[in-house]
């Protein structure tokens, strides 16, 4: 799995300039926990980067989004590997990132990874064939996991229902909820289509049933995306149960990315991104999803609402794949970021006048509505 040095975050450290970037020997990256898909991704990429460029990657597992993003914000690590759902929360200042000392952040894509497909599923023998049939059925929520919970809310909304129409069961973890679905304790859940939980469900006696999200049902998609704006429509072609003859289905799509902050020097990001580019033939065999972290995915804007880091832009221009379309995308994302940051300051003043405590539940809802009203969710 390459050179992965688990270490405590080292506080501080000087910025890296051009000469230092040219002699770059080690970088640090936060990740989801050991054993997760993201951790395996980071391990494979770390091995490739070290082989082609001699750069070691210190991967630091962290338990939640705040603990993954805070070290990068403080300059203690240079990168973090996380999904587009997490990136959206950070860049839009939502949920945990709606605290007074957070708000919208200048997050950047240091590498745009492959698409993560997230689908809604049930046991194959549950007799539920459409999300509109969930009334009175049991669905999961995971307290403290807004990405998971909003996706579930979106799936229920796709079916024309609200959370008041279903029975909510709380679970302590994503994996725990997936296991509960397999065991019949709940009737619908969501997961990455190649994740361990749906694989277990597909292998169980009841089998698995994936709900197809009709791409032509614009009203249903609008309801879904109002709850999870970080996603896009996608056709899942990699999923549990495929080997048993289940046909491709439409699901949510958004990328797994390597993130960085705007203030991280362009030379450093360029050097690391170039090493990933050059190491593709090494890391693509380290996980079934890593072949899709290819050069084509790097310029795919599906489910992306964040600017590229200037160091990555430099690499893409050098490789001749930066286009007028990407230039337009980049400008739009930078403009939207500036608008969100200005709106944050304005909204804080308005909330104070209304005695709304910044960071509280009322504030989180107020901020979401402000961003929505200004058409800045996506």
Image (cartoon, rainbow, N blue to C red):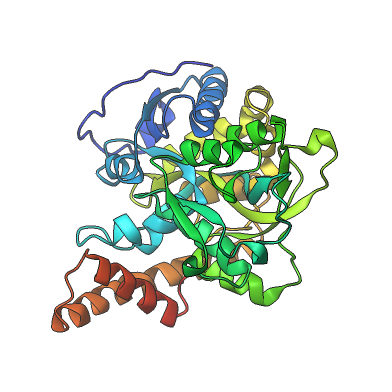
Q: Residue at x 51, y 20 (%)?
A: 50
For image coordinates 29% across by 72% down, the residue present is 344
Pick whichever, 323 or 184, lies toward us: 184
Q: Is residue 45 above or below residue 168?
A: above
Say above or below: 44 vs 131. above
**Quick check: can you spot residue 248?**
yes
Nearer to us in this view, 203 or 274? 203
**Residue appearing at x 53%, y 26% in the figure:** 40
Image quarter in which the N terminus is found:
top right
Q: Residue at x 26, y 71 (%)?
A: 362
Vertical comparison of 340 with 279: above or below: below
Up the image or down, 210 lies above or below 285; here it is: below
Residue 309 visible here: no
Residue 267, horizontal then vertical, whole percent: 43, 40
Residue 201 vs residue 275, the one in the foreground: 201
Q: For residue 246, which quarter of the picture?
A: top right
Is 13 displayed left or right of 72 in the figure? Answer: left
**Spot occupied by residue 224 in the image (x, y as percentages of width and height):** 58, 67
- Asked if residue 169 lies left or right of residue 199, the reply is left
Q: Nearer the viewer, residue 339 or 83?
A: 83
Question: In which quadrant of the rendered view does residue 326 lie?
Answer: bottom right
- Residue farthest toward the front in the current orientation of the protein: 136
């Amino acid at each position: 799995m390459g050179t992965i040095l688990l270490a405590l975050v080292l506080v501080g450290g000087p910025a890296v300039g051009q000469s230092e970037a040219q002699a770059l020997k080690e970088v640090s990256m936060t990740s989801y926990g050991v054993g997760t898909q993201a951790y395996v991704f980071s391990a494979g990429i770390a091995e490739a980067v070290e082989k082609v460029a001699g750069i070691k990657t210190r991967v630091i597992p962290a338990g939640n989004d705040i603990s993954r993003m805070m070290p990068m914000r403080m300059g203690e690590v240079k990168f973090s590997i996380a999904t587009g759902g997490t990136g959206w929360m950070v860049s839009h200042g939502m949920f945990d990132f709606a605290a007074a000392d957070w708000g919208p952040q200048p997050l950047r894509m240091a590498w745009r990874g492959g698409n993560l497909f997230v689908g809604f599923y049930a046991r194959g023998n549950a007799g539920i064939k459409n999300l509109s049939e969930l009334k009175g059925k049991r669905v999961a929520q995971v307290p403290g996991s807004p990405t998971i919970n909003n996706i579930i809310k979106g799936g229920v909304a796709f079916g024309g229902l609200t959370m008041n129409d279903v029975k909510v069961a709380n679970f302590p973890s994503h994996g725990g909820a997936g296991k509960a679905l397999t065991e019949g304790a709940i009737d619908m859940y969501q997961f990455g289509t190649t994740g361990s939980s749906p694989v277990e469900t597909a292998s169980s006696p009841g089998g698995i049933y994936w709900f197809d999200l009709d791409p032509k049902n614009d009203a249903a998609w609008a309801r879904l995306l109002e709850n999870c704006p970080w996603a896009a429509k996608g056709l899942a072609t990699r999923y549990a149960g495929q080997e048993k003859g289940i046909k491709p289905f439409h699901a949510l799509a958004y990328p797994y990315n390597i993130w960085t902050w705007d203030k991280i020097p362009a030379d450093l990001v360029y050097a690391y991104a170039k090493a990933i580019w050059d190491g593709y033939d090494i890391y693509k065999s380290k996980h079934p999803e890593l072949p899709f972290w290819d050069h084509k995915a790097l310029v795919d804007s599906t489910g992306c609402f964040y600017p590229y880091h200037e160091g990555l832009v430099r690499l893409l221009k050098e490789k001749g794949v930066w286009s007028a379309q990407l230039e337009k995308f980049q400008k739009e994302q930078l403009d939207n970021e500036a608008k969100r940051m200005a709106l944050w300051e304005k909204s804080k003043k308005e909330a104070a006048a209304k005695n709304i405590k910044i960071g509280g539940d009322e504030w989180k809802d107020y901020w979401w509505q402000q961003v929505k009203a200004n058409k800045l969710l996506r």
